[in-house]
Image (cartoon, rainbow, N blue to C red):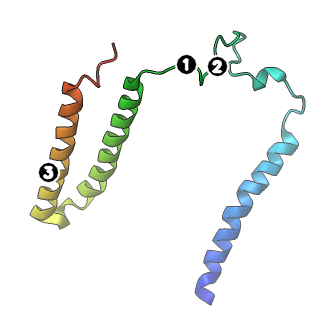
């Protein structure tokens, strides 16, 4: 049971610190409510349309998905580079297969024009 005491203490600290910070922020904050803060833009320009009524180009979403895919690639490359010596040839081949699959996807998206903004 003695081994679980540090975990319990850490959990209590992890739960109590955000609660304490929120309480301090509530006490210290400026108290008056400004209705301008509830508007979508604080620049003073009235919104011309509702955000859910407008249509966005599918290219926006394609770029977002491609960003996520290549961001995940970077996340996988870093730990692989750290333990590269231990993985030897098998790890190298596995990463080259992974990169080849991503390269095929990238070339497909490029040929389909998903990376062009206009």
Mark toward the viewer: 1 or 3: 1
Q: Residue at x 65, y 81 (%)?
A: 5
Q: Secondary structure at mark 3?
A: helix
Q: Quadrant of residue 3?
A: bottom right
Residues at marks 1 and 2, CA–CA distance in whole angstroms: 7 Å
Q: Which of 25/95 is in front?
A: 95
Of the 4 image quadrants, the one containing the C terminus is: top left
Q: Which of 32/21 is in front?
A: 32
Q: Residues within 10 Å of mark 3 (few under 14, many from 20)?
A: few
| Rendering coords of residue 110 (x, y %) | 22, 27
The residue at which mark 3 appears reads as 96
> Tag on residue 54?
1
Q: Quadrant of residue 52?
A: top right
The residue at which mark 2 appears reads as 50
Q: Residues within 10 Å of mark 2 (few under 14, many from 20)?
A: few
In the rendered view, tell whether residue 112 sits above or below residue 103.
above
Q: Residue at x 64, y 19 (%)?
A: 50
| Rendering coords of residue 61 (x, y %) | 41, 30
Residues at marks 1 and 3, CA–CA distance in whole angstroms: 42 Å
**Left or right: 23 with respect to 13?**
right
Q: Residue at x 14, y 52 (%)?
A: 97
């Amino acid at each position: 049971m003695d081994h679980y005491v540090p975990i319990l203490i850490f959990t209590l600290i992890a739960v109590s610190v955000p609660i304490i910070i929120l309480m301090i922020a509530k006490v210290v904050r400026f108290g008056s409510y400004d209705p301008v803060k509830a508007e979508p833009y604080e620049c003073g320009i009235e919104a011309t349309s509702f955000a859910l009524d407008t249509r966005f180009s599918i290219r926006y979403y394609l770029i977002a998905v491609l960003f996520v895919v290549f961001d995940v690639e970077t996340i996988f490359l870093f730990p692989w580079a750290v333990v590269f010596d231990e993985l030897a040839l098998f790890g190298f081949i596995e990463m080259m297969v992974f990169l080849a699959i991503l390269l095929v996807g990238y070339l497909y998206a490029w040929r389909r024009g998903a990376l062009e903004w206009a």
